[in-house]
């Protein structure tokens, strides 16, 4: 499969993943909710997962049980390490399944992993053939132009979004005492004041969990000694 076609599939599945998240969360919260940490309507984890399934699991297309199991495992691994890496980079927990049964460190749960397995089967047998058939109707030049335009937009979105997210790391928490909940609320309120795009990020992740760093822990210990 050509790189440009793979990139377009990545964008398509990132968009479909975002759309699915928006619909599910909006139903749960009973109000319109924008999802994803990017400004645009994309959830890259779905695009990456779709490409990994396409590249690694296509050989299991004639064995549905094996395809389902492998897609479930692959989706769980991807979600776990995405959560771990993003938390290490931004010191922020973007999602938390601690309230769900059969979860691992709140990063993945059995329900979401099974969802990846089901999506993997649908991807290989329905979505991939459908989208590839559509792309085959475009000339190579058209596919290349569309890919380049989307790539530029995607890169700009990533740079802009990361600049916004980086504000989480520089928020001043010196006035707080020793409550993680207070810190989280303080950061969320501070982020809301920066820009419309930052406010969109906070709304997209209502359960944003800010992790207390070592310096803050030291500050709390000093505060306890003083009190």
Image (spheres, rainbow, N blue to C red):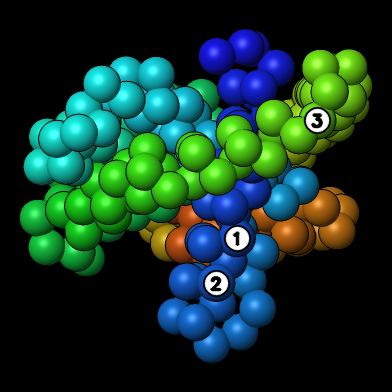
Q: Seen in the image, is 138 located left or right of residue 26?
A: right
Q: Secondary structure at mark 1?
A: helix
Q: Secondary structure at mark 3?
A: loop
Who's the residue at 25% across and 21% down the image? Answer: 59
Do callouts 1 and 3 mark residues in contact (Cβ within 8 Å)? no
Please state which of residues 27 and 219 is positioned toward the viewer in this rendering.
27
Query: Mark 1 or 3, which is nearer the eye?
Result: 3
Residue 39 on image: x %, y %: 76, 47
Residue 115 on image: x %, y %: 28, 54
Q: Which mark is residue 138?
A: 3
- Which residue, given by chain and number where applicable, does mark 1 sit on? 19
Q: Residue furthest top?
A: 2
Do callouts 2 and 1 mark residues in contact (Cβ within 8 Å)? yes
Q: Quadrant of residue 144?
A: top right
Q: Is residue 100 above or below residue 137?
A: below
Circle 2 crowding by C-alpha within 10 Å: few under 14, some 14–19, many from 20 = some
Query: Mark 3 or 2, which is nearer the eye?
Result: 3
The residues tagged by marks 2 and 1 sit, at their Cα atoms, a distance apart of 6 Å
Q: Which mark is residue 23?
A: 2
Please state which of residues 39 and 11 is positioned toward the viewer in this rendering.
11
Who's the residue at 62% across and 37% down the image? Answer: 133
Does residue 93 appear in this view?
no
Q: How many marks?
A: 3
Please state which of residues 223 and 69 is positioned toward the viewer in this rendering.
69
Who's the residue at 16% across and 42% down the image? Answer: 64
Does residue 157 appear in this view?
yes
The residues tagged by marks 3 and 2 sit, at their Cα atoms, a distance apart of 30 Å
């Amino acid at each position: 499969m050509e790189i440009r076609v793979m990139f377009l599939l990545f964008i398509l599945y990132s968009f479909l993943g975002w759309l699915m998240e928006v619909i599910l969360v909006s139903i749960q919260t009973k109000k319109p909710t924008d999802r994803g940490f990017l400004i645009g309507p994309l959830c890259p984890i779905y695009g990456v997962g779709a490409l990994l399934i396409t590249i690694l699991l296509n050989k299991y297309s004639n064995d549905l049980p094996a395809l389902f199991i492998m897609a479930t495992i692959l989706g769980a691994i991807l979600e776990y390490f995405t959560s771990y890496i993003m938390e290490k980079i931004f010191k922020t927990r973007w999602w938390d399944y601690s309230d769900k049964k059969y979860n691992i460190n709140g990063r993945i749960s059995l329900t979401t992993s099974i969802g990846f397995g089901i999506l993997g089967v649908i991807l290989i047998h329905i979505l991939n053939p459908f989208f590839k058939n559509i792309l085959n109707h475009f000339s190579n030049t058209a596919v290349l132009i569309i890919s380049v335009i989307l790539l530029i937009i995607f890169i700009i979105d990533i740079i802009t979004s990361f600049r916004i997210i980086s504000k989480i790391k520089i928020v001043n928490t010196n006035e707080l005492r020793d409550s993680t909940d207070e810190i989280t609320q303080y950061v969320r309120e501070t982020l809301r004041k920066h820009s419309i795009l930052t406010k969109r990020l906070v709304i997209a992740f209502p359960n944003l969990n800010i992790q207390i760093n070592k310096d803050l822990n030291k500050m709390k210990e000093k505060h306890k000694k003083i009190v």
